[in-house]
């Protein structure tokens, strides 16, 4: 089954709209993109290496199911967030990881 990037983009733009209501967003920030392992034999190290080559920092969560790919600071705009999300998602999908959104890093 192919990934629906257009639906993901629409969700990102909608999330950005909701996040900005009543809250002053920073001009730039580090953005964390969240990915879940889809196949038990997926290669964490291959995914992390590919993401790092694309400019992301990575970290695994202790649940052994989640990887965070961070980039930035980047402009806090839906276009900039989506640009990096699409890049990270494309990489993650080729390594059997599935996207689960993004958030501004603390």
Image (cartoon, grey):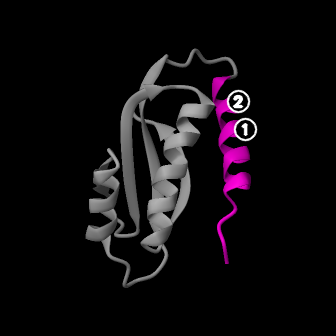
Query: Which of the labelled discs sits on residue 75, or is there none?
Result: none
Mark 2 to mark 1: distance in Å? 5 Å
Judge whether residue 16 is colored magenta.
Answer: yes
Asked whether residue 11 is drawn in magenta, I would say yes
Residue 100: quarter of image = bottom right
Residue 10 in picture, x, y percent from top left: 73, 45
Q: Which residue is mark 2?
A: 17
Figure check: 91 above or below 32: below
Dots 2 and 1: beta carbons under 8 Å?
Answer: yes
Residue that label 1 marks: 14
Residue at 72%, 38% (x, y): give it: 14
SS at circle 2: helix
Quadrant for the N terminus in the image: bottom right
Residue 43: x percent and y percent?
A: 32, 76
Q: Which residues are magenta?
A: 1-20
Which residue is at a point 70% across and 31% down the rendered structure image?
18
Give the quarter of the image for residue 21.
top right
């Amino acid at each position: 089954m192919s990934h629906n990037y257009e639906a993901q983009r629409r969700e990102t733009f909608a999330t950005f709209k909701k996040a900005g209501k009543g809250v002053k967003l920073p001009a730039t920030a580090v953005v964390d993109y969240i990915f879940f392992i889809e196949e038990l034999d997926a290669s964490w190290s291959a995914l992390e290496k590919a993401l790092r080559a694309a400019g992301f920092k990575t970290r695994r969560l202790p649940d052994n199911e989640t990887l965070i790919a961070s980039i930035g600071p980047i402009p806090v705009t839906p276009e900039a967030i989506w640009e990096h999300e699409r890049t990270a998602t494309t990489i993650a999908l080729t390594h059997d990881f599935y996207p689960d959104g993004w958030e501004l890093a603390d």
